[in-house]
Amino acid sequence: MASQPRLSFEAPTPDDRFLSAILRVSQQVEAVARDVAVLKQHIARQRREIKEAVKRQHVAAIAALGGRCPCCGSREVVGADGRKAEGAEFDHFYAASKPDLEHTWLICRPCHSDLTTGRLARDEREAEFRAYQNRRRRMAPRVAGLL
Ligand SMILES: [Zn+2]
């Protein structure tokens, strides 16, 4: 039997009902995707900037530790004058963590770029971050006196 074009007044077939259900689900997925996008923007806005006092403490700590990038140990991030070197960047080590002294550090631009673009996985520098935080904490009373 040859198939004939279906007329619009015919009752919906199982295929029609299936496609209609798929359409409803896809609209719900769209709505969830929009909600997630709004939430992501909200989280990004809530991620506060690193305060000047925190930045000063990192600069003082790294100066006292020799001025090198705590991530790679090769590039200078604090100059002999005790100031942040050109291009050095303050970094939130953990996504969406507090922008405080314990969750941030000052690193060189190449390290910051590698970490923020994902060329370098954060867990590959976890040991360096921890080592920096431990050294900084041990000397904190001494550095705090300089601020
Ligand atoms: Zn570095």
Image: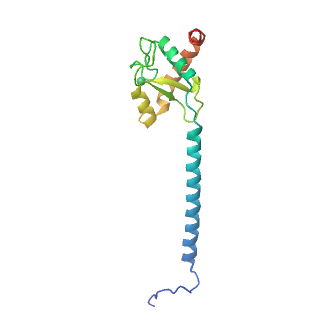
Going 58% across and 49% down the picture, which residue do you hit?
Answer: 38
Going 55% across and 28% down the picture, which residue do you hit?
Answer: 50
Q: Quadrant of ligand 1?
A: top left
Q: Quadrant of the C terminus?
A: top right
Could you say where residue 14 lies in the image, as x and y percent from the top left? Answer: 57, 77
Going 54% across and 76% down the picture, which residue do you hit?
Answer: 15
Q: Residue furthest bottom?
A: 1
Could you say where residue 137 lies in the image, as x and y percent from the top left? Answer: 58, 16
Residue 85, quarter of the rendered image: top left
Between 60 and 129, the residue placed more toward the observer is 60
Q: Quadrant of the N terminus?
A: bottom left
Going 45% across and 19% down the picture, which residue do you hit?
Answer: 84
Could you say where residue 119 lies in the image, as x and y percent from the top left? Answer: 41, 35
Between 125 and 44, the residue placed more toward the observer is 44
Residue 134, quarter of the rendered image: top right
Q: Is 21 located above or below residue 62 in the figure?
A: below
Q: Is 72 located above or below residue 47 in the figure?
A: above
